[in-house]
Image: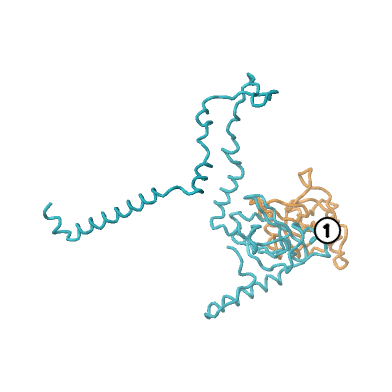
């Protein structure tokens, strides 16, 4: 007990300061409580509803149905009990399929890039009419113009069309498939397509044909970008730089 | 009627029968064929094949690409704009030496790797 001040020479001073601070806080509090409530405070206190009686009377199973009588303020009470509706199962348990899709998407697209690439909210998202390239874990990457995006949760798929050896080839790819390693935007349609499904592009009049020249241009632009980066100069973000991996 | 995409000389091939199946054929399905239109320069050779076919049903064709949609085990779907075929002998060897068109990758699964390796592109 006697040694304590020796070890902590500022101990008493600290306790003194603390006491002083607390006293000040206490004073402030008393002063605040002493003030008379303002008009707004009065209104607020009166607007607070009284504790609901229903919580107290929740145990009671029912109230009774009343019929409006001729004498106002004195309705006729019947013997028919009116029960409160049971709690909504839908509110307690949300749609299982929606949560399942969300969980599967979380599992298959951990970074969320694939979702963002085809999200309607993303202004830079891939849209029908753009030329996309899908890299799968086997075979060559398939590039083609996107004819439609089927939005169906985890089954969301894109339809790509290209010409290989002068034969039109269409491929559906699931965007969340583990076999799809990457989807890249090769070329953006200059004007937004006014349809969601560009099936008219199968007609010879509207067919884009082979998109190999666009892919080659995109690859060249990527090469320029990478070489600039290597030299340390500031490279411009090309059209294809928005690709997702 | 299918386009013939090999250099056997046939241009358009008519399907006579789908082997072992009472439904439509798909990619990699062999079927006896008769040759309807031949390229003029190959006429002699084609006549020989047709004779062979008529005599002993020696030649057949493997469907190389299908205009109908074909779904793959991974969920992707492939669809070609036309129906095409490659002529094969009864032993299963291709009659032509080159394939000039895109073929479906289903040929690998159905053990037609020889046709697949001859093709310039597969999808």
Q: Position of residue A164 (x, y in %)?
A: 74, 65
Q: Position of residue A223 (x, y in %)?
A: 60, 75
- The residue carrying mark 1 is B49
Chain shown in cyan: A
**Is residue B93 toward the left or the right of residue A53 in the image?**
right
Q: Is residue B86 visible?
A: no
Query: Can you say whether A45 is above or below B108 in the image?
Result: above
Label 1 crowd bin: few (<14), some (14–19), many (20+), radius 10 Å: many
Q: Position of residue A178 (x, y in %)?
A: 58, 54
Q: Colour of chain B?
A: orange
Quadrant of res A167: bottom right
Which residue is at a point 83% across and 58% down the rendered structure image? B49
Q: Position of residue B57 (x, y in %)?
A: 81, 51
Which residue is at a point 69% across and 61% down the rendered structure image? A127
**Is residue A165 toward the left or the right of residue A31 in the image?**
right
**Is residue A40 toward the left or the right of residue A160 in the image?**
left
> How many numbered dots are placed on residues in this image?
1
Q: Nearer the viewer, residue A12 or A122?
A: A12
Q: Nearer the viewer, residue B19 or A239?
A: A239
| Subunit bearing disc 1 | B
Which residue is at a point 85% across and 52% down the rendered structure image? B55
**Is residue A65 toward the left or the right of residue A20 in the image?**
right
- Of helix, strand and loop, which one carries label 1? helix
Query: Can you say whether B55 is above or below A55 in the image?
Result: below
């Amino acid at each position: 007990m006697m040694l304590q001040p020796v070890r902590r020479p500022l101990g008493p001073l600290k306790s003194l300061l603390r006491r002083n601070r607390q006293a000040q806080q206490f004073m402030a509090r008393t002063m605040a409580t002493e003030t008379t409530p303002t008009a707004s405070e009065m209104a607020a206190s009166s607007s607070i509803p009284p504790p609901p009686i229903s919580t107290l009377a929740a145990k009671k199973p029912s109230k009774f149905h009343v019929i409006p009588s001729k004498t106002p303020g004195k309705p006729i009470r019947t013997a028919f009990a009116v029960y409160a509706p049971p709690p909504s199962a839908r509110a307690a348990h949300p749609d299982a399929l929606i949560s399942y899709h969300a969980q599967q998407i979380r599992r298959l697209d951990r970074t969320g890039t694939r979702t963002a690439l085809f999200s309607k909210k993303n202004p830079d998202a891939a849209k029908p009419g753009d030329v996309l390239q899908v890299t799968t874990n086997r075979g060559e990457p398939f590039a083609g113009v996107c004819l439609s995006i089927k939005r169906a949760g985890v089954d969301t798929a894109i339809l790509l069309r290209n010409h290989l050896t002068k034969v039109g080839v269409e491929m559906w790819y699931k965007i969340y498939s583990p076999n799809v390693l990457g989807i890249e935007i090769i070329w953006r349609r200059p004007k937004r397509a006014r349809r969601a499904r560009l099936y008219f592009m199968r007609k010879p009049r509207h067919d884009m044909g082979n998109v190999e020249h666009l892919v080659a241009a995109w690859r060249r632009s990527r090469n320029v970008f990478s070489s600039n980066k290597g030299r340390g100069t500031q490279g411009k973000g090309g059209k294809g730089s928005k690709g997702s991996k | 009627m299918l386009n013939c995409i090999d250099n056997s000389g046939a241009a358009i091939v008519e399907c006579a029968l789908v082997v072992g199946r009472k439904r439509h054929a798909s990619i990699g399905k062999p079927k006896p064929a008769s040759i309807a239109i031949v390229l003029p320069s190959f006429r002699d050779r084609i006549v020989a094949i047709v004779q062979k076919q008529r005599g002993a049903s020696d030649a057949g064709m493997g469907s190389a690409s299908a205009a109908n949609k074909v779904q793959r085990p991974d969920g992707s779907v492939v669809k070609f704009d036309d129906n095409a075929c490659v002529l094969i002998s009864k032993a299963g060897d291709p009659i032509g030496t080159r394939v000039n068109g895109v073929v479906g990758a289903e040929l690998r699964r159905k053990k037609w790797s020889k046709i697949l390796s001859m093709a310039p592109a597969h999808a």
